[in-house]
Image (tube, rainbow, N blue to C red):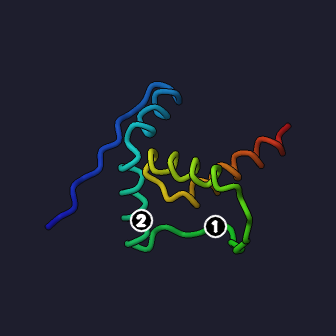
Amino acid sequence: MPKKSIIVPRFRTEGEEAAWWDAHPEVATEIMSRAIKSGKAKRTVPLKTVTMRLPVPDIKAAQDLAHQKGLPYQTYIKMLLHEALKKEQSA
């Protein structure tokens, strides 16, 4: 059975695009799943495992927000950390 085609609309503004992706997290998840299965998803930077102690309420908040976005919570935390570091570096 062939996979259903994924259609991402054209956007007039970055804000419109961001709103669409926020409203359709399952599309991003499916695109990434297909890329991983096909071998097209490649890591561009090496990863290192770290252990951190975080407050339970922070972990719960991250899990809840990640679930709303259709993401694993650890991936969501990595995204937030990456964005914060990038912001601090440019300040």
* Circle 2: residue type: Ala
Q: Please state which of residues 43 and 30 is positioned toward the viewer in this rendering.
A: 30
Identify which residue is drawn at 68% across, 72% down: 47
- Lateral position of residue 19 relative to residue 49, left or right: left
Q: Position of residue 65 (x, y in %)?
A: 52, 45
Identify which residue is drawn at 74% across, 45% down: 84
- Give the residue number, with chain letter if any, for mark 2: 35
Q: Which mark is residue 91?
A: none
Judged from this view, the residue extending furthest toward the left is 1
Q: Quadrant of the N terminus?
A: bottom left
Q: Give the CA distance from mark 1 to mark 2.
A: 14 Å
Query: In which quarter of the view is residue 74 placed?
Result: bottom right
Identify which residue is drawn at 45% across, 50% down: 67
Q: Position of residue 79 (x, y in %)?
A: 62, 52
Q: Position of residue 50 (x, y in %)?
A: 73, 71
- Give the residue number, with chain letter if any, for mark 1: 44
* Circle 1: residue type: Thr
Label whose residue precedes the other's in the sequence (1 or 2): 2
